[in-house]
Image (cartoon, rainbow, N blue to C red):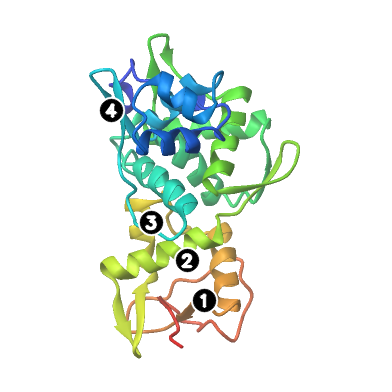
């Protein structure tokens, strides 16, 4: 039995977070030294959503509480954009829940996203019962079984709507209109992740900082997103589309270096900036 069943008393993020917007100002308030609910409330001017925001931040592993006072954990990475630092820290903490066979209870955020990536679902409506039922069936195959005191927690329309709000807040999906969304990770976040992964486990090729795409995907799984190559060994389409845009706009290059096997960008047409046997992302230097 996975450890997703071992923390029945802990809240469940798809229940706790219904309106993600206030979470960030509450975190900033705690980080600036407001440690009690009354001081946070006075500082943020937040009343009705304060409890939910505090609970959500605890499930994001971004705040804790000791002796009745809240404290903030630091951002994982020191980035120029505080918004990006916040979102990437939350995703990093969620990624720590995604150990195969030993899923954490809050892994649901990234597991839902993985399902969309893996099944090439680029557009969805967030009250599509057949889709979240299919996700539940997939959860059975990977032994992810989050529990509450009432038993196993399952998707329903409100929970999947909450998931969509969280995913939009974190920069994983775009809202088109109403309940309609596209699966599109924030390009700035993907580029920043490339830069961070190169700093951590990259190399230099032709005097350019670089990383093999397989190492980059592993870094993503360890630090940000639960993403794997397709059955054909390619990068999933939704992520490939963002990488292609970064290549087209000159932020990165994708070429062949060394003898590691090629990894294609699924759904991306032939392009002069992409080698047919490409296996490495590089950052061009001015």
Q: Are marks 2 and 4 in contact (CB under 8 Å)?
A: no
Q: Distance from label 3 to label 2 (Cα)?
A: 12 Å
State which tag comes first along the sequence, 4 or 1.
4
Quick check: 214 above or below 33?
Answer: below
Q: Position of residue 91 (x, y in %)?
A: 41, 45
Q: Please name the residue that numbered disc 1 is placed on.
A: 251
Q: Mark 3 or mark 2: which comes first in sequence?
A: 2
* Mark 4 vs mark 1, CA separation in Å: 40 Å
Q: Nearer the viewer, mark 2 or mark 4?
A: 2
Instruction: Say which of marks 4 and 3 sits in front.
Output: 3
Q: As displayed, is residue 93 above or below residue 42? A: below
Label 2 close to label 1 by CB (< 8 Å)? yes
Residue tagged 2? 191
Whole-Å distance between the Cαs marked 4 and 3? 22 Å
Classify mark 2: residues with Cα within 10 Å, few (<14), some (14-19) or many (20+).
Answer: some
Which numbered disc flags the more N-terminal residue, 2 or 1?
2
Residue 22: x %, y % from top left: 54, 32
Residue 93's quadrant in the figure?
A: top left
Q: Residue at x 36, y 44 (%)?
A: 95
- Which circle's residue, 4 or 3, is located before the other in the chain? 4
User: What residue is shown with label 3?
Assistant: 220
Name the residue at 39% across, 25% down.
145
Q: Earlier in the sequence, mark 2 or mark 4?
A: 4
Q: Residue 105, located in which quarter of the rendered image? A: top left
Q: Which residue is denoted by mark 4 in the rendering?
A: 3
SS class, disc 3: helix
């Amino acid at each position: 039995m996975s450890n997703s069943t071992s923390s029945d008393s802990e809240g469940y993020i798809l229940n706790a977070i219904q309106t993600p917007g206030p979470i960030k100002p509450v975190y900033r308030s705690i980080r600036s030294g407001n440690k009690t609910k009354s001081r946070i409330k006075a500082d943020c001017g937040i009343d009705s959503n304060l409890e939910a925001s505090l609970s959500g931040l605890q499930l994001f592993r971004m705040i804790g509480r000791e002796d009745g006072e809240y404290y903030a954990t630091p951002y994982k990475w020191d980035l120029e954009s505080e918004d990006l630092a916040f979102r990437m820290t939350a995703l990093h903490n969620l990624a720590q829940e995604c150990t195969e066979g030993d899923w954490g209870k809050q892994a649901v955020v990234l597991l839902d996203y993985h399902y969309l990536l893996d099944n090439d679902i680029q557009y969805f409506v967030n009250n599509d019962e057949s889709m979240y039922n299919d996700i539940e069936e997939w959860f059975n195959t990977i032994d992810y079984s989050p529990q509450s005191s009432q038993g196993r927690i399952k998707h329903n329309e409100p929970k999947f709507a909450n998931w969509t709000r969280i995913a939009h807040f974190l920069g994983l999906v775009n809202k088109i209109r109403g309940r309609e969304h596209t699966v599109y990770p924030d390009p700035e976040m993907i580029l920043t992740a490339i830069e961070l992964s190169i700093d951590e486990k990259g190399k230099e090729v032709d005097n350019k900082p670089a990383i093999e795409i397989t190492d980059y995907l592993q870094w993503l799984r360890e630090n940000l997103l639960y993403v794997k190559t397709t059955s054909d060994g390619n990068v999933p389409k939704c992520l490939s589309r963002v990488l292609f845009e970064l290549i087209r706009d000159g932020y990165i290059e994708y070429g062949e270096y060394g003898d590691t096997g090629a990894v294609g960008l699924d759904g991306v047409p032939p392009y002069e900036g992409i080698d047919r046997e490409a296996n490495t992302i590089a950052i061009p230097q001015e």
